[in-house]
Image: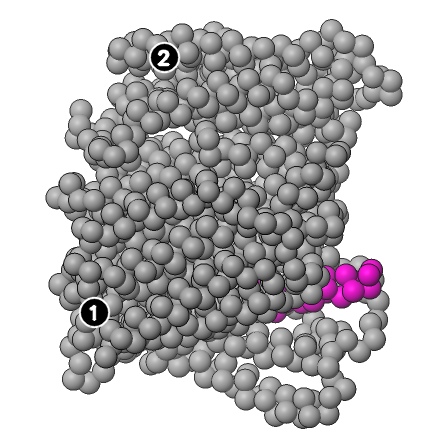
Amino acid sequence: MGQILDFTLLFLLLVTAVATARVRDLFAAVMLSGIYGLVSASFFVTMDAVDVAFTEAAVGAGVFPLLLLAVLAMVGRYEKTAYRRPWAALILVTITGAMLVNGTLDMPAFGSADSPAQQHVAQRYIEESPEEIGIPNMVTSVLASYRGYDTLGEVVVIFTAAIGVLALLPSLGGGVRRKRESDGMGDHQVLRIVSKILMPVILLFALYVQFHGEYGPGGGFQAGVIFAAGIILYTMLFGLDTAQAVIKPSVLRVLAATGVLLYGGVGLLSFLSGANFLDYSALAEDPVSGQHIGIILIELGVGITVAAAIILIFFAFSEAAGENGEET
Amino acid sequence: MVTDFYNYWIVIALMMIGFFIVIVQGNLVKKLIGLNIFQTSVFIFYISIAKVEGGTAPILTEGVVLYSNPLPHVLILTAIVVGIATMALALSLVVRIHKAYGTIEEEELQERDHEC
Amino acid sequence: MLSHLPILQVIIPLLAAPACLLLDRGRIAWAFSCAVAIVSLAISLSLLHQVSGAGPLSYELGGWDAPWGIEYRIDLLSAYVLLVVNGVATLVLVAARSSVAAEIDEAKQPLFYVLYMLCLAGLLGIIATGDIFNVFVFLEISSLATYALIALGRDRRALWAAYQYLIVGTIGATFILVGIGFLYSLTGTLNMADLAQRLPALAESASVYAAFAFLVVGVCLKLALFPLHLWLPNAYAYAPSIVTAFLAATATKVAVYLLLRFHFSVFGASFTDPVLPLEGIFLVLGIAGVFVASIVAIFEDNIKRLFAYSSVAQIGYMVIGMGIGSATGVQATLLHLFNHALMKGALFLALAAVVYRLGGANFSHIRGLGRTMPLTMAAIVVAGLSLVGVPGTVGFITKWYLVMAAINGSHWLLVPAILLGSLLALVYVWRIVEAAYFSEPVAGTETCREAPLGLLLAMWLLVIANVYFGLDTRLPVAASDGAVRLLMGGAG
């Protein structure tokens, strides 16, 4: 049964990928890309990777297509040129693929429980993290503590992207902004009311995901994305100006920086009691409760930076789209 | 043999379709969509490595002894974030290129560069 | 606090970046970044001192033992490369103020320095870490910052160059990710020292070869090894001048470091792939890179692009050293890593000064500039001679070690090839000398003044280093010698 499901999902992915390669309408390609994200997320669920599925659904079927749509609104939806040098590319891709297939031949069989990947480092995470860290979700334990430094890097990556986008797209908050006519969809009475009911639910859900990551799937990143999604929904309905009046870009910049600094600051706190960077055990008398405090704090840092960065990026794109609209 | 690896092979086919789109497509947005397929397929590759037959999601549950491997999950969570960060930056470049050149087709861009 | 130095080396610039965002003005952001870079440089000096005395340092992040947590591992090789990167990054940053003020909008200047700090922290993180997945994370931090920095160039072609680099860089990073995936599935670990212990038992496995191939190709895309270099010339030519100086002197060096680390520390010096005989391939691609890129450079009109092609050629020399594969060959690679940073740092800073005064760096701009900007042009001449490999400069030291390695390894054909490569470099450097000293200035440039003090200072410090380390080679030779012994360890 499980195998049939796996195979069906993989087959769907294959169909989606081929369709993406063939379709000439970029709008359709964006939709296919969203489908690809959603099907991958479903596949992750069948692979028991619920945290990853959650994130992939939010990113692959949410944030990415949304950004693509914002860009298509500016650059047009049909592509012009035909394939360039398709044969050379086909040869290159075939060679690369053949090397990969050849590489799989000596890999441990799919799903085996006694392969090195399952045996060596991972075993400790599975067997001891519930006692060492004191929380049931092992993914959160590894993410926030054993490999907490990678996660700091991850937060810095999204921070870097936000700074890069700010540096490239028309300035946010700086310079004189013209007041635009209502550019949202706020005139629709039904949308207005539904969204007003929906907003608090979305934001509450974000908070739930933020603090529930230790017990179930979720955590700072997912919470940040959901929170950002709420604000993005608000922006789409009521227009950029209204949204920026509620949440000022200058505040978002400070928040994006604060999240990273909070994370790094928790790491530096460990120095005070002579422990290494990011050693949360040093944060309290009892190592396990120290881990607990550390994880809550750094997840908060992740959530703040991710939410602020994604909202900033979305604002920057909307603003660019607005200017584009005025020119044409 | 085939049942051991068919999963990986389909994933490799997915990766290569994405890679192919990146190379042959002249449209800058379409290239990014291809790149996203390429990256997402690598994520599927990792998550497949983590799968344990008969295991459950790595959240401690009463009476369960077999869990999927949490480590690749963590790595891919990071990689997904890196991926979307790259895409956001790339898309902002596309917007700027469109503003500066009036096109996002590779061939036309190269022509316009040769003009000046 | 001394025991925390390995992490402080990376975390100080890393956290300085968001802190820098809170500073509103370009000038303050610059001063703050300079202070951070100087502290970072001091840390790397201290690390090199510690490591050469007491051997490799290990630092367990989060307090978790090595294969379970992420480990920072500083040995002589990483300490040496950390010093090179920090040294150049600091000098370039000190020089940056006037050039950045001229080339970047006032409102974006703080963002520029934030990105610079992020890029630096990313590069340092790649060097310091002992965990292979952590390499990927920090590689992406530095890469994302780099793409944005390049795109800040004033020419619209900077945008297109940044996009192309982003595509190539992301493909490279994804290849590296695939390689890491194979390694993890085979060994169950991500720690490089642990990998090195577990891989020999799997030496004949097709999956290990695949992992190796994907890691090497991924890094070579970042390294801009010929023929994977196509992204580099435009990226260097149209990036803001300061960014070019920074990248040319650091980013490719870190890629060389990664290649050495993967090849020697993870897979082991004796590892060879029967399908992909790396050493032969490196020799062929290295020589081809030297010739093709040098010849293209000779016909280039934009001097930033000229030196960008020259960088592709110089990467060729570094790869030739690795291709020879002997201890002397790898030492030549390491020496050139240091020497090339000094040369290109000086050259691109001098070009930044030219762009600052004249608004561009084509041959038409520098005609007769030997009279109006004597110090800047003299810097280009000395650093250019170093590039050629004239005795008394660091360039000569590299060529000397390379030729020795070629002779010892009986690669007779390499010797004339290296000499011919130098001759080609002489041709393009001579073109600049000719334009600067033996041509009449273009109307309007007679009143041009010498470069601003900050730029002159940093540029000349690098020029002096080019000569100083060409005469007194103790520091780089001792450090690279120790690093090579560490790398080649088991294989003798």
C456 in the magenta segment: no
Q: Which residue is mark 1?
A: B52
User: In the image, what residue type sits under mark 1?
Assistant: Val
- Residue C49 appears at what percent x and percent y? 35, 32
Residue B65 relative to residue A66: left or right: left
Q: Residue at x 71, y 26 (%)?
A: C361
Q: Secondary structure at mark 1?
A: loop
Q: Which residues are magenta?
A: A309-328
Quarter of the view holding residue C205 = top left
Residue C82 visible at all: no
Distance between mark 1 and mark 2 Cα atoms: 52 Å
Closest to the observer: C246 or C97? C246
- Residue B110 appears at what percent x and percent y? 66, 39
- Residue C196 appears at what percent x and percent y? 21, 42
Q: Which residue is mark 2?
A: C414
Say whether mark 2 and mark 1 are on the same chain: no
